Image (cartoon, rainbow, N blue to C red):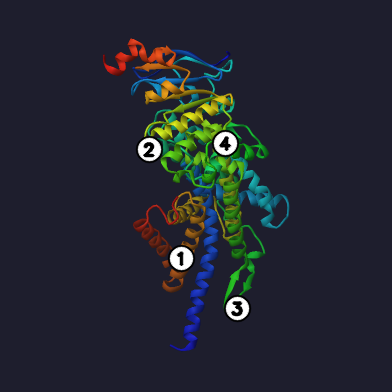
């Protein structure tokens, strides 16, 4: 299977503090890779490095065979890297439809004629048709989370970086998100997914990596990573 | 009180409301550019008034080249000022913007300060440049409109020039609102103003979006400058006066609100004219500032704050 994303010896320090420490991993095309780790493990920083908000201190990021390490965020977005935030950050003074439109037009590089129908499809896929005309800043939490995913999807990404959707949701709602993300993957999108809720990660991902203090602790099949002594020590203190 | 007294008292009020409203449209045009750049990128452009005066001179230059009616110089002034705004933002202001400073790890308050210092310097350079180029002689853009008035009734009239400007102001407001609401570029500007960190993740280039917003801002300042020049005599150092008017309007209407700049402008205009009518010319300024103080005390974020 071809590699969609390859991360090589990636490091980021803020002063003396290494938030990401010599991390290397690869994600195959069409795969769902879960990222786990305790608070402060460097998971969200890793997403910042991949999306381009954070400039690495060392290392390289290769996306679809191209070195994107030096590219600014908007160039990475246009190449197909989309990122969501744990605390959704919609353009609050714009409607849901407008939010998706800017994502489709800029990130998705669609022209006006194609952007409209595409946004309609994304709204249907994410179950947000009825919210299309709502100001995104006024959406309730669950809808905000869905909107965050919908807007990323509107960019027609090749790689979707999902940062914690399960927190604060009921099991039923989490299952809806799992189904949605798996449906997105079926359309050919590669997914990297950070989650705190272990149950979700076990069932919903193809492979896991575990981070601790910025370092890669373990990687492999979900059950194997959970069973590994290093991960158990970090999580259970055992 | 006789019927006659009542009639004239009403005429005074009506005249005050009409000329105040007309003045308000003119004030709004002066303020829109300022409120737009603040709303979009938290940039307070202290040279806004100087660019306005610069545009008035630019209009004079065009008039010296081709003998046309002054309003037609807008065809030249507006695109030139758009280009100036775009280039300034791209080459200079983007480097010192609050966003750039935050990215370099500076605090937000430092970030907000740096473009203020830079545009303050720009204001001095512009005024001195105009002085060197055009001398300190008072200039005026001659036009026929300022001599004519439209008679509304026997005792009520409105200056044709002011009415024209009011209509232009409303047209510019509507066009700007439409541009922001319904176009590709406008949505990008609104997105970047909502969350400058997220916009690039959606594929937008803030540097270019900000440059476009600055271009629009100075293009509108260009319209304001030509109007100012057609209304009253001007000199190279008049910029700060217009900056003050713009600040007043923006405080009243709320930073970043287009509708607020029209309402704020009209409020300021009406209060100034009525204060002048009842308490003499010296009360005009005092009345305006008292209104601003009252709004600052009661609704400091402005009447139409986002």
Chain that bears disc 4 = A
In the rendered structure, find residue B211 and report the number of the disc placed on it.
Answer: none
The label nearer to you, 3 versus 1, is 3
In the rendered structure, find residue B272 and report the number of the disc placed on it.
Answer: 1
> Is B27 situated above or below A195?
below
- Real-space Cα separation, disc 2 to disc 4, in angstroms: 40 Å
Q: Secondary structure at mark 4?
A: helix
- The answer to whether one can see residue A148 in this image is yes
- Real-space Cα separation, disc 3 to disc 4, in angstroms: 59 Å
Total numbered badges shown on the rendered structure: 4
- Real-space Cα separation, disc 4 to disc 1, in angstroms: 53 Å
Q: Are marks 3 and 2 on the same chain?
A: yes
* In front of the other: A144 or B186: A144
Chain that bears disc 2 = B
Place of residue B89 in the rendered image (x, y in percent of width and height, measured from the top left): 54, 37
Q: Are marks 3 and 1 on the same chain?
A: yes
In the rendered structure, find residue B153 and report the number of the disc placed on it.
Answer: 3
- The answer to whether one can see residue A11 in this image is no
Q: Secondary structure at mark 3?
A: loop
**Residue under label 4:** A122
**Residue under label 2:** B109
Q: Are marks 2 and 4 in contact (CB under 8 Å)?
A: no
The label nearer to you, 2 versus 4, is 4
Who comes first in sequence, dot 2 or dot 1? 2
Q: Are marks 3 and 1 in contact (CB under 8 Å)?
A: no
């Amino acid at each position: 299977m071809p590699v969609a994303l390859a991360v090589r010896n990636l490091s980021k320090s803020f002063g003396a503090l290494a938030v990401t420490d010599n991390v290397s991993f690869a994600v195959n095309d069409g795969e769902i890779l879960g990222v786990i780790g305790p608070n402060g493990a460097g998971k969200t920083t890793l997403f910042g490095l991949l999306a381009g908000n954070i400039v690495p201190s060392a290392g390289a990021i290769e996306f679809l065979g191209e070195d994107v390490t030096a590219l600014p965020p908007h160039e990475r977005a246009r190449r197909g890297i989309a990122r969501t935030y744990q605390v959704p950050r919609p353009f609050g003074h714009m409607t849901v439809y407008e939010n998706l439109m800017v994502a489709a037009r800029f990130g998705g590089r669609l022209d006006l004629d194609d952007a409209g129908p595409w946004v309609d499809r994304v709204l249907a896929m994410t179950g947000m048709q009825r919210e299309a005309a709502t100001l995104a800043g006024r959406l309730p939490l669950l809808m905000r989370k869905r909107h965050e995913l919908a807007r990323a999807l509107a960019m027609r990404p090749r790689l979707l970086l999902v940062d914690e959707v399960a927190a604060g949701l009921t099991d039923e709602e989490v299952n809806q998100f799992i189904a949605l993300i798996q449906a997105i993957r079926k359309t050919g999108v590669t997914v990297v997914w950070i989650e705190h809720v272990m149950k979700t990660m076990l069932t919903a991902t193809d492979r896991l990596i575990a981070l601790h203090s910025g370092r890669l602790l373990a990687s492999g099949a979900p059950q194997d990573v959970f069973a590994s002594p290093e991960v158990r020590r970090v999580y259970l203190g055992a | 009180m006789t019927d006659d007294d009542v009639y004239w008292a009403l005429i005074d009020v009506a005249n005050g409301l009409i000329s105040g409203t007309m003045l308000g449209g003119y004030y709004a045009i002066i303020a829109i550019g300022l409120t737009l750049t603040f709303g979009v990128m938290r940039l307070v452009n202290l040279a806004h008034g100087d660019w306005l005066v610069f545009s008035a001179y630019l209009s004079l230059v065009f008039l010296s080249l081709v003998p046309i009616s002054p309003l037609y110089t807008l065809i030249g002034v507006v695109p030139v000022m758009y280009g100036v705004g775009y280039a300034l933002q791209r080459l200079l202001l983007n480097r010192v913007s609050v966003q750039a400073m935050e990215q370099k790890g500076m605090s937000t308050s430092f970030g907000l300060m740096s473009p203020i210092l830079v545009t303050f310097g720009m204001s001095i350079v512009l005024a001195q440049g105009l002085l060197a180029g055009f001398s300190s002689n008072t200039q005026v853009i001659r036009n026929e409109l300022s001599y004519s008035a439209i008679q509304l009734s026997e005792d009520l009239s409105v200056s044709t020039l002011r009415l024209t400007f009011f209509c232009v102001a409303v047209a510019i407001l509507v066009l700007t609102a439409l541009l922001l609401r319904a176009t590709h570029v406008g949505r990008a500007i609104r997105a970047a103003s909502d969350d400058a960190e997220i916009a690039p993740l959606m594929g937008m280039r803030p540097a270019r979006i900000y440059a476009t917003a600055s271009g629009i801002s100075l293009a509108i300042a260009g319209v304001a400058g030509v109007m100012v020049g057609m209304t009253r005599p001007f000199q190279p150092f008049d910029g700060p006066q217009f900056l003050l008017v713009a600040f007043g309007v923006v405080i009243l209407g709320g930073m970043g609100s287009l509708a607020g700049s029209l309402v704020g402008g009209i409020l300021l205009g009406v209060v100034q004219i009525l204060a002048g009518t009842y308490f003499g010319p010296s009360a005009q300024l005092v009345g305006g500032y008292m209104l601003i103080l009252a709004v600052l005390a009661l609704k400091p974020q402005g009447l139409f704050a986002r």
